[in-house]
Image (cartoon, grey):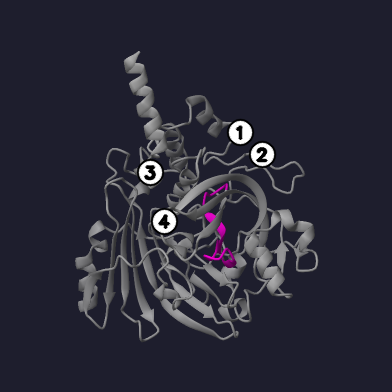
Amino acid sequence: MKMRITILAALIGAAVSGQGFAEVSVDEAAKLKTTLTPLGAEKAGNKDGSIPAWTGGYTKVPAGFKPGSTRPDFFAGEKPLYTVDARNMDKYADKLTDGVKGLLKKYPDFKLNVYPTHRSAAAPQWVYDNTAKNATRAKLTNNGFSVDGAYGGTPFPIPKSGNEAMWNHVLAWQGESVNHPINCWIVTGNGKMSVCSQGDENKLSPYYDKNGSLETYKGVYLYGRFVQSAPSSKAGEAILVHEPSAEGMNRGIWQYLVGQRRVRRAPSVSYDTPDSVTSGMGFFDEAFMLFGPWDHHDYKLVGKKEILIPYNNNKAAAANVEDLMGGSFLNPELVRWELHRVWEVEANLAPGKRHVVGKRKYYLDEDTWQISLFDGWDAQGQLWRTSYTLTLLAPDVPAVFGNVFWGTYNLQNGGYYLNAASNGTGKQIAPAPKLTEKFFTPEELANLGAR
């Protein structure tokens, strides 16, 4: 009897600390092969058919496509089903986030052109296989801010908490080794547009090493290196990051500053520090929809809902940036919106922590687990900012990329930006030859500055 009480107390303690055992049974995990998609979304469409069933995603590569080149708009012949604007927004209120409502109220000319929904998301079969394994073996540790027992797929395809859903975003499939332009344009509150950063980024995800395993995984899920080429005042500056998922590992973040001609640790490149890449218009933890540590908030899994989100935006990705940006918002005629099911996660400032954004609401696309939209409130409880990503359909990977063409609208001062964009470069995010971990060391970054 005493042993049973001891075990029960240990289990309760582990659950309270966010270090509980996997809560998904074998029978529940089996749904990933029946009623759920391999990554955990509902396979069926919705009741009225406005969201279709998932049938495997979009994996057809267009004839003559060259890896790395600009991808076509796969749904170019479609017309909007309807348009949402300030005049009829009340009719669609249950399908709009607070941030989108804020944009519609602030700008009478802002609108959403809503197109047929395409559940185009796909991943390789081996990612699906690993996801099925993760379903019953992955667990949270470190009060929910580390993961154990996950590798090579969505860690929590049937999530039970806000932290599990957020880890699904952090560890979402976006390729193993990729290269892409990181170009950023800003528009100030008075409508003035300018380029604030241009450069190139390489990423390596050991978590998604096809030839690796849970046993060989060392705990760093992402290596990233961004080198700026413009404007001239920033040319040569670089950021290097090592992002861990395992408990007990510290994040590695370094900067190379041309003026100092040295590499230094940069722990301030995190949380609500103004993001230098966006000329301070964004915060570092807004980058890529979530960047760096996120333990200054508590996360609640609110549930699933149907909302309008930007999706399959290859048209916007191929447009001239002068046509896409300008004025007070992205050109509505170039941005595609679709109705999708999302998971809503509410984040509130944790006791004893500080952050200028006291509350956020995240909306994670059920098919990719990537954050599609999120809103932020200031310390006074006023809606302040809304962030978006113009997801890019890449059947050649296959993937839907949500870590490119993202930005934030400041609803209080009227400015906004678009980052990680490749408009006008002639190339897009694409699989790249696998680089060694040595490429992502501070020493190699220092050598870059010496050349």
Disc nearer the start of the sequence (3/2): 2
Provide the residue designation for mark 2: 44
Q: Amino acid at mark 2?
A: Ala
| Residue 279 vertical position relative to residue 140 in the rendered view, above or below | below
* Quadrant, the C terminus: bottom left
Callout 3 amino acid: Asn
**Residue 373 magenta-highlighted:** yes
Q: CA distance from mark 2 to mark 1?
A: 7 Å
Q: Which mark is residue 143?
A: 3
The part of the image, by quadrant, that contains residue 175 is bottom left
Name the mark nearer the viewer: 1 or 3: 3
Cβ atoms at labels 2 and 1 below 8 Å apart: yes
Q: Earlier in the sequence, mark 1 or mark 3?
A: 1
Q: State the quadrant of the N terminus.
A: top left
The residue segment tinted magenta is 366-385
Q: Please provide percent x and percent y for residue 91.
A: 79, 58
Tell me, for residue 296, which label it has, or none: 4
Q: Is residue 264 left or right of residue 174?
A: left
The image position of residue 402, as x and y in percent, is 51, 59
- Label 1 and label 4: CA atoms lie apart by 36 Å
